[in-house]
């Protein structure tokens, strides 16, 4: 298995029943709407890649559609939860716990506290903006103030 991998619609079928995945992809679509699966996958991949890039500790893969293999199952579950939310389907207790795990993992990635695999083809630049600081300017004390001007 490669160190970084793509998420496909077929991956969703590995974690959920085909009938559910098909319903999530095709139900409640307007006449002009298309299957929301690719856009949802892209959203999850982007969220994960930005969290990894933000830490500044890890290098992303050059292929912008890939994520670390160790995070694939977590990401696929996230896609399912987002698609269920689109249809206003309630999450199970297990899915709610998975969402809490997702949020914790994103926080750990941003803080650089969760290691990810090194990509075979590293990206040359990071999409995350480097954090910057503010310069503090010291000022001189005021010459005229209430106490120095008392009696005038």
Image (spheres, helix red, strand yellow):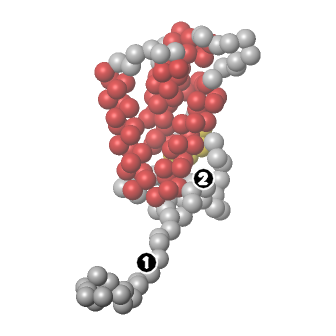
Residue 51 position in % (x across, y down): 48, 50
Farthest-out residue, front: 152
Which residue is located at x 53 percent, y 43 percent? 47
Nearer to us: label 1 or label 2: 1
Do residues under tags 1 and 2 come within 8 Å of each other at their CB atoms? no
Of the two numbered discs 1 and 2 on the same chain, state the one appearing first in sequence. Answer: 2
The quarter holding residue 130 reads bottom right
Q: Is residue 5 visible?
A: no
Category of crowding for the residue at label 1, using alpha-carbon neighbours closer than 10 angstroms: few (below 14), some (14–19), many (at least 20): few
Residue 1 position in % (x across, y down): 54, 41
Q: CA distance from mark 1 to mark 2?
A: 37 Å
Which residue is located at x 35 percent, y 87 percent? 144
* SS of the residue under disc 2: loop
- Between 34 and 58, the residue placed more toward the observer is 34
The numbered dot on residue 61 is 2
Residue 2 position in % (x across, y down): 56, 45
Q: Is residue 79 above or below residue 114?
A: above
Which residue is located at x 29 percent, y 82 percent? 146
The residue identified by callout 1 is 136
Q: Is residue 70 left or right of residue 120?
A: left
């Amino acid at each position: 298995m490669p160190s970084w991998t793509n998420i496909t619609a077929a991956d969703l079928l590995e974690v959920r029943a085909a009938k559910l995945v098909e319903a999530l992809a095709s139900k409640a679509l307007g006449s002009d709407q298309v299957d929301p699966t690719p856009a949802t996958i892209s959203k999850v991949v982007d969220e994960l890649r930005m969290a990894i890039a933000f830490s500044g500790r890890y290098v992303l893969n050059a292929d912008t559609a890939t994520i670390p293999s160790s995070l694939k199952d977590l990401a696929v579950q996230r896609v399912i939860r987002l698609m269920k939310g689109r249809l206003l389907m309630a999450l199970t207790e297990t899915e709610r716990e998975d969402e809490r795990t997702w949020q914790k993992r994103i926080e750990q990635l941003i803080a650089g506290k969760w290691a990810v695999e090194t990509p075979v083809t590293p990206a040359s630049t990071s999409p995350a903006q480097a954090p910057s600081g503010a310069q503090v300017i010291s000022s001189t004390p005021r010459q005229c103030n209430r106490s120095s001007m008392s009696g005038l």
